[in-house]
Amino acid sequence: MTERIKTGITGLDEMLNGGFLPGSAVLVEGAPGTGKTTLGIQFLYNGAAVFDEPGLLISFEEFPYALYRDAESHGWDLRKLEEEQKLRVIFTSPQVFLSSLQSPVSPLNRTILEWNVRRIVLDSVTHFTRLTRNPKELREIYTMVINGLRREKITSILTSEGNTLGLRASDQSRLAFVVDAILLMRYVEIESAMQRAIIVLKMRGSDHDKEIRSFEIRQGGMVVTGRFEGREGLLTGSPRRIAIE
C-alpha cells in the first residue's frame, strides 16, 4: 500500500483511503464556521504529537493567542509542542509569506529545514486575493506557493472561504486546478436543524470515498460520524428524502 499521511481524525482517514498522499497540496473549502481551521490544527497536532511529523501553522487572519486558546478547548497544547520544536505558529501577511518562501535564507525556510517540517497549514489562502484580482496572476501565485511546498516534500492544507452552498466557489480563484485534493465542508439543513457535511471532491493519484459524510466538532476535535441515510440534494441547499417506491 502507498505510504499515507494520516490526519488522525476519526472517520476522515477512512474517507481518504488511509490518508493524504505524501507531499500533496490539499484545499479545504467551506463557509465560515464549518470547521476548516479546526481540521487544520488537528492535522498538525496529530502530526506532531502522534506521528512525529513537525508542522507549521501559517495564519493570515488570527493572532497566535486566539489559536492557542481554541486549541486548548480541544485539549491540544500548541505551546508545549512549540517548546519541543515540533510545531510553530506564525502570524504573517500573504506578501511576507511569499517573499519568505522564495528566499532560501529566510526564517521560514530555516525553520522548515532545521525542524524537518513535514506538514503545513495555510489559513486562509483566500487572503491572497488581496494581492491581485487577476485570475491569471492569482493562479501563478497559488502555483508558486504549492510548488514551493512540494519542493520540500511537505504535505499542506490550504483553507479557503467558500459559499455556504454549492460546488462552484473553488472555481473563482482557479486554485482547484493546481491542488492535489479538495475537501468541501458544508452546512446542511436536516429537518430544521443545521448539520455539518464533508465530501472528498478530488484526490489526485488515489481512490477515495465519494459519499457525503456528516461530522461534528466536539471537545477533542473533529469526528466524522457517518452517512446521511435516505437523503439527496444535500449540497444544493434543498435536501430531501429519497422516495422509496
Image (cartoon, helix red, strand yellow):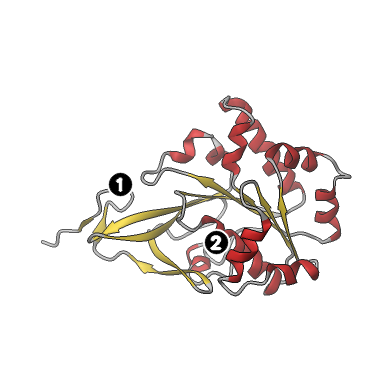
Callout 1 amino acid = Thr
Residue at image position (60%, 26%) is 136
Which secondary structure lies at badge 1?
Answer: loop
Callout 2 amino acid = Thr
Position of 131 relative to 73 (above/below): above
Residue that badge 2 annotates: 38
Of residues 68 and 133, the one nearer the viewer is 68
How many neighbours does mark 1 have within 10 angstroms: few (below 14), some (14-19), or many (20 or more)? few
How many neighbours does mark 2 have within 10 angstroms: few (below 14), some (14-19), or many (20 or more)? some
Which secondary structure lies at badge 2?
Answer: helix
Can you give x and y, in whole percent of width and height, for residue 102 in the image?
A: 80, 39
Q: Is residue 81 left or right of residue 115?
A: left
Of residues 141 and 5, the one nearer the viewer is 141
Residue 5 appears in the rendering: no
Residue at image position (60%, 67%) is 71
Q: Is residue 121 left or right of residue 104?
A: left
**Quadrant in which the N terminus is drawn:** bottom right
Position of 171 relative to 81 (above/below): above
Residue occupying the far right of the picture: 105
Residue at image position (56%, 39%) is 175
Q: How many marks?
A: 2
- Residue 146: image tag: none
Can you give x and y, in whole percent of width and height, for residue 87 in the image?
A: 74, 64
Give the image quarter of residue 243: bottom left
Q: Is residue 92 left or right of residue 83?
A: left
Residue at image position (76%, 47%) is 151
Can you give x and y, in whole percent of width and height, for residue 215 in the image?
A: 42, 65
**Quadrant in which the C terminus is drawn:** bottom left
Could you tell me how far apart the alpha carbons at marks 1 and 2 are, in whole angstroms? 25 Å
- Residue 236: image tag: 1
Q: Is residue 153 left or right of residue 130?
A: right
Can you give x and y, in whole percent of width and height, for residue 104 in the image?
A: 86, 43
